[in-house]
Image: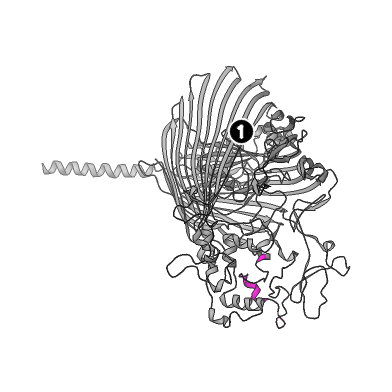
Amino acid sequence: MQSILSLRTMVGLIGLILATLGGRAQAPRATTIAGRVTDAGTTDGLPGVNIVVKGAQQGTTTNATGQYALTVPDGKATLTFSSIGYISQEVTVANRSTIDIALKADDRSLNEVVVVGYGTQRKIETTGSIASIKAADLVQTPIVNVAQGIQARVAGVQIVQNSGAPGGNVSVRIRGTNSINGTSEPLYIVDGIQISNGGNLTDISPLSTINPNDIESVEVLKDASATAIYGSRAANGVVLITTKRGKAGKTSVSYESYYGVQNVSKTLPVLNATQFAQLENEAFKNNYYPDPASLGEGVNWQKLIFRSAPIQNHQLTINGGSEKTQLALSLNYFNQQGVIINSGFQRYSLRLNVDHRISDRFKIGTSILGSYSINKGVPYGTTSLGDGDFITSSILGSALGAPPNLQPYKADGSLFPFGEQAAGQYREVTNPLGLAAIQNQIGIQRTLANIYGEANLLKGLTYRASFNIDLQNSLRDTYSPRSIVNKADLNDNSGSGSKANANGVVLLHESILTYARTIASHHTLKFTGVFASQSNLSNSNSINATGFPNDATNNEALQLALTRTVSSSRTRERLDSYLARINYGYKDKYFLDLTARADGSSKFGANHKYGFFPAVSAAWRLIEEPLFKQVSWLSDLKLRASYGLTGNAGGISPYQSLATVGSPNPNPSDYQFNHTYLTGINPLGIANPDLRWEKSTQANIGLDISLLNNRLSFVVDVYNKKTRDLLYIKTLPLSSGYGSITGNFASLENKGIELAANARILQGAFRWDVSANATMNRNKVLDLDGGTTKERFVTTYSILSVGQPLALFKTYVFDGINQTGDAILPGYDGRLGGHKLKDLNGDGKIDANDQTVTGNPNPKLIFGFSTNLSYKNIDLSAFLSGSQGNDIYNQARFAFETPLGQRNLLAGVANRWSPTNPSQEYASAALSSRLPVSSRYVEDGSYIRMKNVTLGYTLPKIKGFQRIRIYASGNNLFTLTKYTGFDPEVNTYAGSNTVIGVDNLVYPPARSFLGGLQVTF
């Protein structure tokens, strides 16, 4: 038995040795493969093609002529050939030494679809100026509304964050300011529902009621060809917003969340208590503070009103369906507390999108967006002019001007009004904590709903009917408590509160008929016809009350107040529209679009109820010409041109064309009979049967270029837009019985250049993409009122002037401080130690003839830049924005450099003029001595801001999860600017077209750091 085992063992060992030897003899040898990679369409060599051995680390790239050489482990290896803009190929070596490959172009970029008015188009078919923003870019920063996400991402679009307050509004200008007294805000369309944004400073943007995380894509329509389909509402551009819809296939559930902390990015240095006491002694020329040094630093009021504030967002999304029915459902909660105490914004939202195909011919669906938002505000950004007490009626002005030697709280912890301190010396200055205690809250319920039905009537012929509703209800609560009033000032009218309800319903029906056909394989024809009817109904009512017995019930028992006033209003308007569009294409080389729309509005005068808005555009894809097809590095080349007419109806209120009567404001009881005040009614507005749309004619030439297999792409647009029949308030002679009339008198011009670039620098395991855009727009006032007025002041420093840009600053020229021995010119409040002004015309006095243009608030250049890098599971992105060449009138600096006494000033005033300190910057203290409006307060508003930096990591695959990503993000990290205020992105007058770039202490933006989680199951 043992011998048998030994024999078997020996045989086995011999067999193993032979097998090993045989295996060594047949071991695969490394093989070198060479060849050339070409374009299948042009046969040109392709440079930079990636060639890797599948499942191994070996790889190489082709040279400038497409040649390559690569060593592979054996003849059975598989090679993968890939390049941007081409379809990848896998090839088995099969013991070959030469392998030539022809890669086919990937036409997906050519067939990319963009949303246009009442339909979609392939990107190569577009003849107008249209820009698209990806959903991921839109929400890269923590935003409340979609307009904030568009900022600095689209050429030709200027977006200014009017206020950094949570839920704060933005001003959006597409290709410049297009009106004077009307609106310049674009039209927003959310899943077919039309929305307007007022843009005023303290308004809650209607876009804030829409959850940005629900948005799939945003298209910005800029030229007349793209916007004319919306006729009388399109002169300011159109923003199309499409929300996410369900997709057939496996149901996915995702959860997204982030949480962060915000802090104010900058505070303004002011005088400390010692310096303030010295200033007061000089201003009042007494020794009210015998020992200023003993007061030390005093109270830092800015530190008391600013805080670290949390921001958080949570979203649950369900998406899926079958081939017949698709559903998308999301729930969202957003909460942003303000960096100023007692301010914040919350939003609860729900979105449901359902599409169901009944049969091959019929389809129905719905989109429902519901939200409830709560905004708590504080007073900021007064539009009153000058340096009076109003400047401290805003919480920021109050914090800057609050005497640092006073105390915020009493010993019992209650608020300490300033009038009860320092023997009442500062009773006219408000404790900023008292302003923060004023209730100002608005709750908004909003529902956007769309129901549609679609039928394929014949081959290529489709009818779609949609019914839309925008339902909005709001309740504003205000209450100013008695507790913040000085005891000496308490009276029967102390304590005030109000409740204001506003309700709006917008109903819109659209019938859309579309016919599309391809003729002889080369000609494509598409016809779109639309009838639309929209009605807007709104009503409001409010009750205001003063004189409360105490603060126990706030504004919840207005009947307890001594005095109450009630007001109400109701308006209704209607717009009927008829429109048609023809799209023609030939061989994907030539394209022609014709658009026409007729709008009839109840708001306009009897002689101009209807307006007609046509447009024409064409495109020539030069890349399809034989000459350019031979250029291997040229991927696409298209020339576009358009011309058209659009309208602006946003500046006209219902009934404005009619003769109106009403009770005088603000007090309707202005008529006295037998010692009794009675309410009367008097004429308010004169009829104007010729009141009509503002009209813009625009010409646009554009060029789209893609290079190196679409690795680089550029878009260039040049435009010229003239707007006429602008609404303007014209003064009437007193004999008419009216002060003024609103009519179509003015005109202005905008022209500019837009540049956009995208680059996919690196692809593969390490990816690097960049994008940038820049806009140069110039506007000019062509006429104000038919030639009668050439120039007029809108404020004490802003003008409208024919032949000049809008809203220029016109002031005196600051020339230092009047020193001892200087001749002080007459004509202004000049004094020793006060501001010196230049006598520009040399007549020996200072008057209006010495005022000149000292600033322009319109930027010469606005731009944005973003970059995205990723390596395997790690991603890094950065985004910056900027504005160059614009000026800001720093109204706040003007107020807090004026040494009137009784309020604190900016820290620089410590270096004010005195006989022993001959300063050339800061005036000496003087009671009731006001500074002149001069160029000293016109500052350079240029800036570059690092908007966002995000670092993310996607976890390796985990069973039960499709994707898990964590990230950290910093927002508003730094701003490079020479501006001395809180922030250079400021506009106290918000939606105004005539007063731009003024800083009167609006809510400053916050710097935030947050962490986030994205999970898909």
Where is residue 681 shown, x and y percent of the image?
68, 40
Tell me which residue sits at (58%, 64%) in the image.
Answer: 398
Tell me which residue sits at (84%, 50%) in the image.
Answer: 790
Where is residue 301 shown, x and y percent of the image?
53, 67
**Above or below — where is 214 with respect to 276?**
above
User: Quick check: is 179 in the magenta stretch?
Assistant: no
Quarter of the figure with the N terminus: top left
Determine crowd level at label 1: few under 14, some 14-19, many 20+ residues with C-alpha closer than 10 A.
some
Between 161 and 340, the one lying in front of the other is 340
Farthest residue, direction left: 1
Farthest residue, direction right: 843
836 relative to 524 in the view: left or right: right
Give the tally of numbered discs.
1
Disc 1, SS: strand
511 relative to 30 in the view: left or right: right
Identify the amino acid type marked 1: Asn
Between 193 and 737, the one lying in front of the other is 737
Farthest residue, direction front: 674
Where is residue 343 shown, x and y percent of the image?
51, 55
Which residue is disc 1 drawn over? 536
Between 311 and 43, the one lying in front of the other is 311
Where is residue 820 shown, x and y percent of the image?
78, 80
Quarter of the figure with the C terminus: top left
Tell me which residue sits at (16%, 44%) in the image.
Answer: 6
Magenta: main secondary structure equals loop
Asked whether the viewer can see residue 469, the reply is yes
Which span is picked out in magenta?
895-920
**Above or below — where is 289 with respect to 655?**
below
333 relative to 452 in the view: left or right: left
User: Quick check: is 899 in the magenta stretch?
Assistant: yes
